[in-house]
Amino acid sequence: MRPSKREAVLDTAEHLFYNEGFHATGIDRLASEAGVVRMTLYNHFGSKDALIEAVLERRYARFLDDLRDAVAHCGPEGGIAALAERHCSWLRERSTHGCIVIKAIGEFESHNPAIAALGRQLKRRLLALIGEAVEHDTGMHDTDMSEQILMILEGANALVPVFGSDHAIRHVHALIAHIPPAKTWWTLEHTCG
Amino acid sequence: MRPSKREAVLDTAEHLFYNEGFHATGIDRLASEAGVVRMTLYNHFGSKDALIEAVLERRYARFLDDLRDAVAHCGPEGGIAALAERHCSWLRERSTHGCIVIKAIGEFESHNPAIAALGRQLKRRLLALIGEAVEHDTGMHDTDMSEQILMILEGANALVPVFGSDHAIRHVHALIAHIPPAKTWWTLEHTCG
DNA sequence: GAATGATTATACCGACCGTTACACTTTGGG
DNA sequence: CCCAAAGTGTAACGGTCGGTATAATCATTC
């Protein structure tokens, strides 16, 4: 009982919401699989939707911390590759059903704007983190490059439930390696005269 | 009444399933918004899950036909670009909530294997179509290139509900243009020999 | 040992879920 | 004009949904 009931609920909720879906997971099953009575759940979180927000925030914060950690412990100019590699590790080990945030936005865009907004905020944090890795490697802000890396990672994410992790991951590094770097002031001068 | 009730049900089901979610859309609302009584729905489709399969098949067949049409009416070496452009048109006009197949797989992977399997089959058909466009442009099979194009398109797909169509589409063409072509026999000889 | 806050047990609410049965009415084609 | 097919209206089935109320029990700490 030392690990608080609150944590047990969050663990079970994350597992069920992620693997079975948000709408498809009922409060009764959630509580019983967490070894908790329904009232405990409502005492802690107030509503199913609030629990969903807590799960999203917790899981994605862990994910982002893990990516940040990978970028922090890498050689010079290896930030992007390290981030991509850690992302692929998640796809292999912990994200085998796709991205929980994308799924949440999909299920709640027309039902609970707060959940959808939280999802968008979490993705904005991922984009910002990618931007930091890009700046770590190239020494400059490159919004286009960050957005393109995000698009490739989201593509891999989406393909995991379709063709499996191995297939989805196969081309990530090659694709990222071929993103053209930002034009600098002198190449612009060369091009535009 | 010329447009059969069956079509009305399919239209309404596609709209509701896509915009509000599969589990979140009930039979009652579905029937009433289609201007049909519940029994008509069951007479035509037998069950909600069968209706879902019919909706997926119909919508995605239209999508694939549209892409195929774009590839068919393009100049030489413009097949990939034409396919990508048509895909982006869907993202702008008809796919503003993401890909219905990805959503279906996400909601039914652990509830109805038949629906998930159908989703995977539809995505395989998309990959095959991309392969045809690649062969149209380059004159050879290039599985890697096809898979990479698919990954980019899925990335754009996933980002539409997050940051909007314009943001999601912005980098598609540039990203695809920078995919390295397959190594031919003589470059392989140069590299390995 | 009393008090306090967390957890449990149980019962309940109205609403909706997907599905079926059956009898009735409408419609179009031969 | 008649008949079969398609669609309608109504009622019901057991089950689950998210959420609430209330009172009993437990562990901890002062």
Image (cartoon, coloured by chain):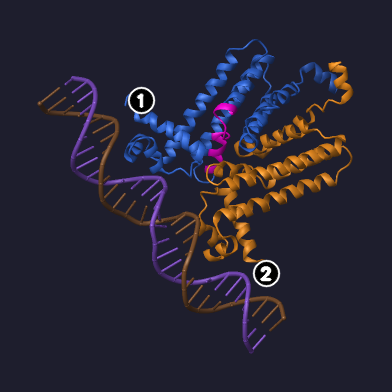
Chain colours: A blue, B orange, C brown, D purple
- Residue at left offset 68%, top offset 38%: B166
- Residue at left offset 87%, top offset 19%: B189
| Residue B115 visible, this orientation | yes
Secondary structure found at label 1: loop
Q: Is residue A105 magenta?
A: yes
Relative to residue A77, is residue A21 drawn left or right? left
Question: What's the chain of the residue with tag 1?
Answer: A
Measured as percent of width and height from the top left, residue D25 is found at 20, 35
Measured as percent of width and height from the top left, residue A186 is found at 80, 16
| Residue B167 visible, this orientation | no
Q: Amino acid at mark 1?
A: Pro
The quadrant of the rendering that contains the N terminus of chain A is top left
Please tell me whether the stretch drawn in magenta is mainly helix, strand or loop.
helix
Q: Is residue A85 above or below residue A51?
A: above
Magenta span of residues: A91-108
Residue closest to the eye, B168 or C26: C26
- How many marks the image carries: the answer is 2
Asked whether disc 1 touches disc 2, contact meaning CB atoms under 8 Å apart, the reply is no
Residue, disc 2: B2
Q: Amino acid at mark 2?
A: Arg
Crowding at dot 1, Cα within 10 Å, few <14 / some 14-19 / many 20+, comes out as few
Residue, disc 1: A3
Relative to residue B75, is residue B7 drawn left or right? left
Quadrant of the image occupied by residue A153: top right
Marks 1 and 2, how far apart at CA: 63 Å
- Residue at left offset 59%, top offset 56%: B51
Question: Residue A59: which numbered mark, if any?
Answer: none
Relative to residue A9, is residue B149 drawn left or right? right
